[in-house]
Amino acid sequence: MTRSRETCSRCDLPICTDREKMKLRDTRLRIRIRWPEGPVCVKCYDDAVHTRGRCGGCNVDRLLPGIGPAGARLCTECAGGLGDFTCLRCGQEGPRYRAGECARCVLSERLAACLDDGTGAILPALVPFYELFRVMPRARGGLLWLSKPHIPPLLRALAGGDVPLTHAGLSTLQPWRAVIHLRDLLVEAGVLPPIDRFLFLLEQWLPGWLASIEDPQHRGVLERFATWQVLRQLRTTSAKQPINSGRANLARHVLRTSAQFLTHLGENDRHLGDCGQADIDLWFATDLGRAEHSRAFLRWCVSQRELPRLRLPPVARKTGARLSQSQRLAFIRRVLTDASIPPADRVLALLILLYAQPLVKIAQLTVDDVLREHDQVLLRLGDPPIPVPQPFADVLLDYVADRPNMFSATNPNSRFLFPGRRAGQPMHTTSLRLRLRNLGLPNLDARTATIRQLLLEAPAAVVAGMLGYHIGTAETLAIQAGSTWTRYAAGDHQRPQGAR
């Protein structure tokens, strides 16, 4: 006899109590608790015990785990039978973590122990970090972070004075991923001064990468190229505005490709000093994509007289398959109508399919770029802000009201439209690209199809201004798209009154 599946009384999704099926990645959810209304899954329970506001029954501002028949949020007394959520230590209502104590009190206790400077008190310099971390909306996330075996030693090393509380001091600690996250938290708390994050990480990565180059002659050339060309250009850019992840990743790729070129010469029993035109032609014929990123290195070698003045063959840029207008419209329809697509993925896809925005710019958008003027929703991508049509306007506003990654200590006050998991940082472009890949949406092809269609419908200057594109780029794309706007004569073309 087949046992009927239960469903969560709140989200109506199928649930189960069999933990073994959960280990086998069963699609059903696990029951967290049974309340008078019925079984409640883990996610709905977690949302319930973190919901605060004014009770729809007694009109008191408190924890609202219950839901009334009409959908009103209710406190535990008005809902009845939900249990007692009052912490015996702090007297506040909240999710329990251990008998009689809420998760926030347990988090404060364990964090204080890790930040003890040896006198039984928290190191004064780390108090702002302590205050920032302990008040995160979902304290269980902080407890999970502290439970990782490598985190308490990092905190104790800083609190005990074993490692200077500076950026340079943090760079001596391992594992590096955990250190990056801790650095971002300390900067967000004001314990450490702000830095250009991606430039700093590149500078930290470079010595280890150079040490991995076995040939000392190759290592010396690459070190000079990295120091006097790559890093100098990035530092010049950083003086005007922080570099983004794309620039930092491109710099790494250029350095790795330069090392591959030197290795390629060595495999053919050649050296940089006796490299000839035939070697250059052979390199560019080997892999066009890889060779393209070595041009900066080869030009630098010529300028430094490491290479004779050789001709660098032109590289034909590969173009992806064009996304037709019907395919673009089909993607828009799917994103707007498929409720199973996460809200963040829907907004991300529509920013590309409607406004042709690059991922680097999307990552830097903030909620302040979403404007409300009377009944109109505007999006500030350029000047002037561009209108947001329905139903995308509703999708965008709903997403802004409930953004992801907002319940930890990393981003409690983040203004980024796509807040990341790192303190003070937006979602990484790699993560955004992965979301598009999961949707089956080709990023570059979709963006190209969108900007071409927009340029067919409006002059390049108008499109460039509203979308934040460079006017020269927009005009070039307009010509490639076959736009007729460039053939219109300047001036007022309105028909005068009375004209036949």
Image: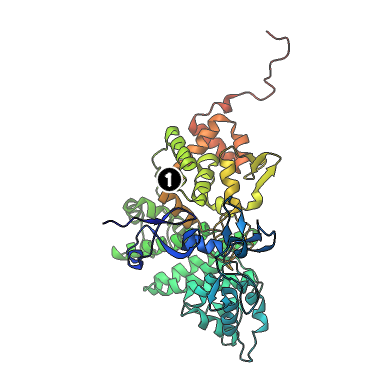
Residue at (39%, 44%) from the top-left corner?
A: 318
Identify the image quadrant of residue 131: bottom right
| Quadrant that contains the N terminus | bottom left
Reply above or below: 333 against 366. above
Work out whether residue 335 or residue 254 is closer to the camera in this orientation and state it.
335
Q: Position of residue 79 (x, y in %)?
A: 59, 61
Q: Is residue 500 left or right of residue 20?
A: right
Q: Position of residue 324 (x, y in %)?
A: 42, 34
Q: Residues within 10 Å of mark 1 (few under 14, many from 20)?
A: some
Q: Amino acid at mark 1?
A: Leu
Q: Position of residue 49 (x, y in %)?
A: 56, 65
Work out whether residue 251 or residue 327 is closer to the camera in this orientation and state it.
327
Residue at (34%, 55%) from the top-left corner?
A: 4
Can residue 168 be seen here? The reply is no
Q: Is residue 497 left or right of residue 185?
A: right
Q: What kind of element bears circle 1? A: loop
Residue at (51%, 57%) from the top-left corner?
A: 246
Can residue 353 be seen here? The reply is yes
Work out whether residue 59 or residue 98 is closer to the camera in this orientation and state it.
59
User: Which residue of the protein is positioned furthest toward the bottom in this rendering?
Assistant: 119
Q: Is residue 11 left or right of residue 467?
A: left
Residue that numbered label 1 is attached to: 441
Q: Position of residue 416 (x, y in %)?
A: 60, 56
| Quadrant that contains the C terminus | top right
Identify the image quadrant of residue 194: bottom right
